[in-house]
Image (cartoon, rainbow, N blue to C red):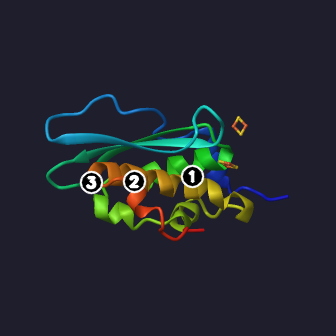
Amino acid sequence: MWEYTDKVMEFFYNPRNQGVITEKKEGEKVVTGEVGSIACGDALRLHLKVDEVTSVILDARFQTFGCASAIASSSALTELLKGKTIDEALRLTNREIAEYLGGLPEEKMHCSVMGQEALEAAIFTYKGIPLESHEDDEGTL
Ligand code: FES
Ligand code: FES
């Protein structure tokens, strides 16, 4: 049986940045990236608010029907994203998300991959790149 770090538990019980982004000012753009199927089960939606001039992520929120690790890692991801530029965010790996939480059990690493994939989807949407064009990318596990 695996064990969760205290930080995973803390982020599970008190998730930061859960929900949607409802407000934006002029010059700000809100985009969403989704992975999995919200209707079906494991799924994650990541919402980003980006300054269109500087490309800095001003706000990040998430919604998930995933497990405890998915909640903790999505929440950690939103904390990691704020203040980063879009290009810096694109370089973020699921390992960094797990490290921020003091580690995730190996069996649960895929929950952090969902966050990384939703992030990629949101950024591609922001850049106006069709999602199909990066399907050949290697996995990050
Ligand atoms: Fe989708 Fe079970 S409801 S796999
Ligand atoms: Fe599927 Fe965590 S989201 S096991």
The answer to whether marks 3 and 2 mark residues whose Cβ atoms lie closer than 8 Å is no
SS category of the residue bearing label 1 = helix
The answer to whether marks 1 and 3 mark residues whose Cβ atoms lie closer than 8 Å is no
**N-term-proximal mark, 1 vs 2:** 1
Decide: is 120 above or below 30.
below
Q: Give the image location of residue 110, x and y in percent.
A: 64, 58
Quick check: 114 left or right of 23? right
Q: Give the image location of residue 25, x and y in percent.
A: 18, 34
Which quarter shows the N terminus? bottom right
C-alpha span from label 1 to label 2: 23 Å
* Residue furthest top in the image: 22
C-alpha span from label 1 to label 3: 24 Å
Q: Give the image location of residue 132, x and y in percent.
A: 42, 56
Q: Residue at x 72, y 62 (%)?
A: 105
Q: Disc 3 vs disc 2: which is toward the camera? A: 2
The answer to whether marks 1 and 2 mark residues whose Cβ atoms lie closer than 8 Å is no
Query: In terms of depth relative to the viewer, which is nearer, 118 or 81?
Result: 118
Q: Residue at x 61, y 48 (%)?
A: 70
Query: In terms of depth relative to the viewer, which is nearer, 98 or 124?
Result: 124
Query: In terms of depth relative to the viewer, which is nearer, 53 or 80?
Result: 53
Name the residue that disc number 1 marks.
73
Say few, some or many: other residues with alpha carbon within 10 Å of mark 1 (under 14 / 14 to 19 / 20 or more).
many
Decide: is 137 above or below 128.
below
Q: Disc 1 vs disc 3: which is toward the camera? A: 3
Q: Residue at x 57, y 52 (%)?
A: 73
The amino acid sitting under disc 3 is Lys
Instruction: Say the numbered circle drawn on residue 131.
Output: 2
**N-term-proximal mark, 1 vs 3:** 1
Name the residue that disc number 3 marks.
127
* Residue furthest bottom in the image: 138
The amino acid sitting under disc 1 is Ser
Residue 106 sits in quarter: bottom right
